[in-house]
Image: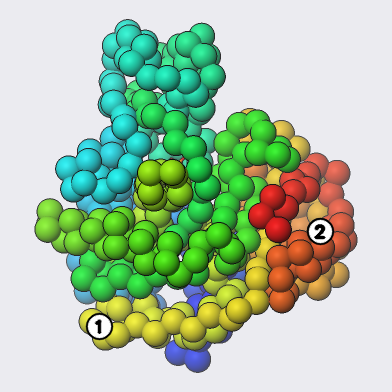
Amino acid sequence: EHAIAYKLKQSPKVSELYAIPGNPGIASLGTCVPGSVEDNEFIVDFVQKNQIDLTVIGPEVPLCNGLADDIEKAGYKAFGPQKKAATLEGSKAFSKDFMIRHHIPTAKYVEVTDFEKACKEVDHFDFPLVIKADGLAAGKGVVIVENKEDAISTLKEMMVDGALDGAGSKVVLEEFLTGFECSLLCFTDGKTIVPMVSAKDHKQIFDGNKGPNTGGMGSYSPVKKITSEIIDEAMNEIMKPMASAMVKEGVPFTGFLYGGLMLTEKGIKTIEFNARFGDPEAEVILPRLESDFVQAILDLMDNKPVELKWTDKVSHGVVLASTNYPASSTKGSLITGVDDVDGLVFHMGTKMTDEGLVTDGGRVLMVVTLEDDLQTAFDHTYKELEKIQCKDLFHRNDIGKKDM
Ligand code: AMP
Ligand code: GLY
């Protein structure tokens, strides 16, 4: 949300910027309004009282709660998919079923709601096996297991013990894909679909892609391996057919459509769709956008051609996360040195107190730099983030390293 607000604010079309609830980073760009992103009534009331011309919905929870529907019903502009279209992210089973129905390349899968049945289904897959909670789980709902014992205990945690707040009462078992993973985000209203520049997330918690999945520990853009031919192929085989199929099924998708893609030996396959800007992709993609972000959104909504201009510079960013993330987060640990950073610092989970800036979440800050090449940006980001001091923060040391 901070990255989105930062780019919105650069538009000459924006006279005032409000964020609900915002964070200490966004507070330097506009007015933060206390309130919950899950309170549709409050948000619609705010939009009406303040005559908000355009609401850009960031996170998945309000999208899946139908916030775009409610703002539009009140007669105001919202950029983000309606509730039904956001189900693409809100339910992995819906998304997989949709892809298979429309021949969008993706991994083989089975959907199960019963623990005993799930345990039996495990025998129909090879290892590693991918187990996905059906519902929203803040990037923590996917577990890759190496053997039957781990499969059963993961299924038990999700389906019987109620881990992930019930998001795993239904699960998807999925074939493990090997290849090169990348993210391709698009602006779309269903009819028009325009790709952004490629980005690479680093989902696992530890260096060398080890440990459990997180919301994302760092990213960079563009990805050298993702040539314009590959982007064309991904658009023609996956992103365009998906946008058209959603229109055909009466659930047109307006907003940022995120494709998590795997370049396999058998072509490009879809790992997942998200119904919003990826995080930490937004923090490296949006700083590269040179043209007017707001104009692009408005043009798309007005059925006009969308023009995007990007810098050739490489952006690189590293997330500073709470010590025990993703298992737990911290609150209240003092953070210093943010203002000394020569680069962009996006706030993810911070809070301003009388003592100063403190941690307030799992992923806390992200430091991003833009340079002529990945190596220079890598060196620069890692130099700058040493200036941030906090006893409870850690980061990966190898974001982008494998691809240099
Ligand atoms: P998702 O939330 O579906 O993107 O899954 C989180 C991460 O798990 C992905 O970014 C991949 O790194 C990994 N993953 C998910 N599905 C698969 C799959 N079918 N094969 C291999 N890796 C996967
Ligand atoms: N970076 C992946 C996501 O936002 O879900």
Residue at position x 33%, y 9% in the image = 120
Q: Is residue 19 left or right of residue 396?
A: left
Residue 196 lies, with reference to residue 69, above or below; the image says below
Q: Is residue 255 left or right of residue 282?
A: left
Q: Is residue 75 left or right of residue 258?
A: left
Percent coordinates x, y for residue 143 in the rendering: 50, 28
* Numbered label attached to residue 107: none
Residue labelled with disc 2: 382
Q: Is residue 4 left or right of residue 85?
A: right
- Amino acid type at circle 2 is Tyr
Q: Closer to the camera, 375 or 277?
A: 375
State which quadrant residue 403 falls in. bottom right
Residue labelled with disc 1: 302
Q: Is residue 16 visible?
A: no
- Amino acid type at circle 1 is Asp
Percent coordinates x, y for residue 225 in the rendering: 55, 60
Q: Closer to the camera, 107 or 228?
A: 228
Q: Closer to the camera, 231 or 51?
A: 231
Percent coordinates x, y for residue 338 in the rendering: 80, 64
| Mark 2 residue's CB less than 8 Å from ligand 2 | no
